Amino acid sequence: MDVLSDVISAMRVGKPHSSRTCKRAPWGMRFDAFDGAGFHVVLQGSCWLFPSVGDPVALGVGDVVFLPRAGVHGMADSRTTSLADTSARSLPDFEAEPTPDRPGAPTLLLCGAYLLDQGRMHPLLAELPEVVHLPARVGSHPSLRAALDLLGNELEEPRQGTGAVVPALLDMLLLYILRAWLDEQTGHAHTGWAAALGDPAIAAALRSIHREPERQWTVETLGALAGLSRAAFARRFATLLGHAPVAYLTWWRMTMAARLLQESDAPLGTVATRVGYTSQFAFAKAFKREFGVAPGGYRRSGTHPGNSEPCE
């Protein structure tokens, strides 16, 4: 798997959720924060997004907004319309409350939510802004537009197989949204994950870490893959991502180990081997240092003990 696919696979929990609905002015809704990420797409008409931080965002036909941390936010037909509280809902669900007949202008919306493990957010997602706004532009992000069309059609006219098609399209849509944001940073970002994935040397090292986390990587071997000396590689990696290569390697191994402990009954020795530890004792020590609890205790608890940044 590539880095972006790994990032999503390591964080997602549960099934994504989506709805397609039409609102007639005046309308306004306020949504509580939830453990995940959300998106809104305007298929017809226009509206306003009110993020928890920053100025309101005007949205037109084809605009996509992605909220990677799904904080408190609102949506309405205008800047002056009051927002009805929807705090009782665990996920944004525009179809949960039928819209009364009104003479106002219609707005057709496609909205969705992803449940993500926010307790250990990958730094790629952590560095995203509170609101990722992808305005509609002719010829921009054709794959994203195609996925939106397919998803909208499935929700408008459900058919046999829609139950399987929609979650797959939502997964595809999330990747296309992130791709689109990364593409728009190309040439503008000088540090961070957009810059790192656009740097052939550092991207090669990251792919290798994700492809073979069990391999006994060193800064020197990773640098050789990147075509750089040990010192030059370490310096470029730290400049772009803010922490040392081995720090990220360890963080990613522990993230994978946590998922294996949560999702499988593999023996601890097997988990240790799969994330690059030849000694179960060394693995347990590293895991406890990262999570504050031994691997066995973590598995028995079934809960996530908290976040840890890869630069620590």
Image (cartoon, helix red, strand yellow):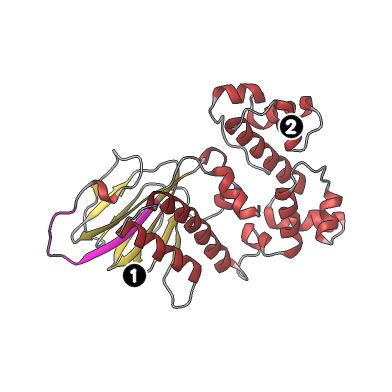
Label 1 crowd (10 A; few <14 / some 14-19 / many >=20) = some
Q: Mark on residue 272?
A: 2
Residue sticking out furthest to the front: 160
Q: Are marks 2 and 1 in contact (CB under 8 Å)?
A: no
Q: Quadrant of the C terminus?
A: top right
- The segment highlighted magenta reads 99-112
Q: Mark on residue 243?
A: none
Q: Is residue 299 left or right of residue 248?
A: left
Query: Residue at coordinates 36% horizontally, 55% vertically from top-left?
Result: 111
Can I make out residue 193 in this image? yes
Count of numbered badges drawn on the protein: 2
**Residue 177: where, in percent of width, then height?**
49, 60
Q: Secondary structure at mark 2?
A: helix
Location of residue 136 (image quadrant) = bottom left
Classify 212 as above or below 46: above
**Residue 267: where, in percent of width, then height?**
69, 26
Is residue 72 in the magenta section? Answer: no
- Residue denoted by label 1: 61
**Residue 78: where, in percent of width, then height?**
24, 62
